[in-house]
């Protein structure tokens, strides 16, 4: 009843936003959103709802379930996202592009990094083909974090440097500043440049607040904070213990396991210092 198109979009967006902000998304929201989208019969609307559902599963620490939803309802990356366009081609809905990053990360976390890299490069190629810098640099953010899952220093460095420079200067997308700064801080850790890592995290922290997100793409941030604290450095507004407590409040069992691992490392270090 009522405006089913709006209901589908609003219910799916509400559940996705809850998960993005670190809260548990009510499953019935997506069920009702799918029902409304099916009743409308618009494939673009159905795709939007199911992409949001898949991404929410990524944020909930369920990458395999996210991939299952993505592949069941969408198959491969939609052709209108990656096909070289003609002059007459109509732009796809923004959700087809802007939300691909978490899906690629789901593949990476699930041990399917080649698939994740393929998705990201296809979107990057689309951005280059259509002369759309934001799309190119969004792909770079994703690639940086996919390479982070592999701990591939050169891959992370190449993507994160460009992405961070672009999004920091662009100034309207703090989420991408947050993600690219964390990736680049990890690079600076590997290069043994602690002051540069601190400076990056001091940009990342307010960017995350501005984005209103509790999303962590992997454990790189915690590695950097642990290393900095071992070197007597603490970025303004950020401590490892505070970040771990924040992470434990999110409905993501996979990342909660990461938090417990780092807490164990802290306890071990404290015990060694006590000796």
Image (tube, rainbow, N blue to C red):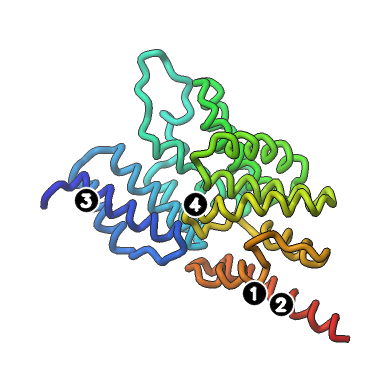
Q: Earlier in the sequence, mark 2 or mark 3?
A: 3
Q: How far apart are marks 2 and 3 (CA)?
A: 45 Å
Q: How crowded is mark 2: few (under 14 residues within 10 Å), some or many (20 or more)?
A: few
Question: How far is mark 2 from mark 4, CA to CA?
Answer: 31 Å
- Rendering coords of residue 162 (x, y %): 66, 34
Give the CA distance from mark 1 to mark 3. Answer: 39 Å
Tell me if label 2 and label 1 are in contact, CB under 8 Å. Answer: yes
Whichever of callouts 2 and 4 sits on the residue coming sooner in the sequence is 4
The numbered dot on residue 27 is: none
Q: Are marks 2 and 3 in contact (CB under 8 Å)?
A: no
Residue placed under numbered mark 4 in the picture: 210
| Residue in front for this viewpoint, 158 or 195 | 195
Q: Quote the CA–CA distance across marks 2 and 1.
A: 6 Å
- Residue occupying image coordinates x 83% and y 48%: 191
Q: Which label's residue is closer to the chain start, 1 or 3?
A: 3
Please give the name of the residue rendered at 33% of the width and 65% of the height, measured from the top-left corner: 26
Element marked by disc 2: helix
Residue 20: % across, % down:
45, 57
Camera-nearest residue between 131 and 273: 273
Q: In this rendering, would 216 be left or right of 85?
A: right
Residue topped by disc 3: 7
Q: Which residue is drawn at 79% across and 52% down?
A: 195
**Residue identified by numbered label 2:** 264
Q: Residues within 10 Å of mark 4 (few under 14, many from 20)?
A: some
- Which residue is the site of mark 1? 260
Q: Of the residues under marks 3 and 4, which one precedes in the sequence?
A: 3
* Residue at the extreme front: 236
């Amino acid at each position: 009843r009522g405006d089913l198109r709006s209901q589908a979009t609003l219910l799916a967006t509400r559940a996705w936003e809850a998960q993005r902000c670190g809260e548990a998304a009510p499953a019935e929201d997506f069920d009702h959103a799918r029902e409304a989208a099916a009743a409308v019969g618009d494939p673009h609307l159905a795709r939007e709802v199911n992409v949001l559902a898949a991404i929410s599963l990524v944020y909930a620490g369920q990458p395999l379930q996210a991939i299952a939803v993505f592949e069941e309802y969408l198959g491969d990356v939609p052709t209108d996202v990656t096909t070289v366009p003609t002059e007459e081609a109509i732009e796809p809905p923004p959700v087809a592009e802007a939300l691909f990053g978490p899906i690629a990360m789901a593949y990476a976390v699930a041990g399917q990094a080649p698939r994740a890299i393929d998705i990201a490069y296809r979107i990057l190629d689309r951005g280059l083909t259509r002369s759309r810098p934001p799309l190119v640099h969004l792909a770079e953010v994703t690639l940086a974090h996919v390479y982070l899952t592999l701990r591939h220093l050169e891959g992370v460095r190449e993507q994160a440097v460009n992405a961070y420079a672009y999004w920091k200067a662009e100034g309207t997308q703090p989420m991408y500043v947050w993600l690219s700064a964390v990736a680049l801080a990890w690079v600076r850790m590997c290069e043994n440049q602690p002051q540069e890592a601190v400076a990056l995290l001091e940009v990342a922290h307010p960017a995350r607040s501005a984005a209103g997100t509790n999303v962590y793409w992997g454990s790189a941030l915690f590695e950097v904070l642990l290393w900095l604290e071992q070197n007597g450095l603490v970025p303004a507004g950020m401590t490892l213990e505070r970040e771990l407590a924040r992470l434990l409040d999110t409905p993501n069992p996979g990342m909660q396991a990461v938090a417990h691992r780092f807490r164990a490392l802290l306890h071990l270090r404290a015990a060694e210092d006590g000796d």
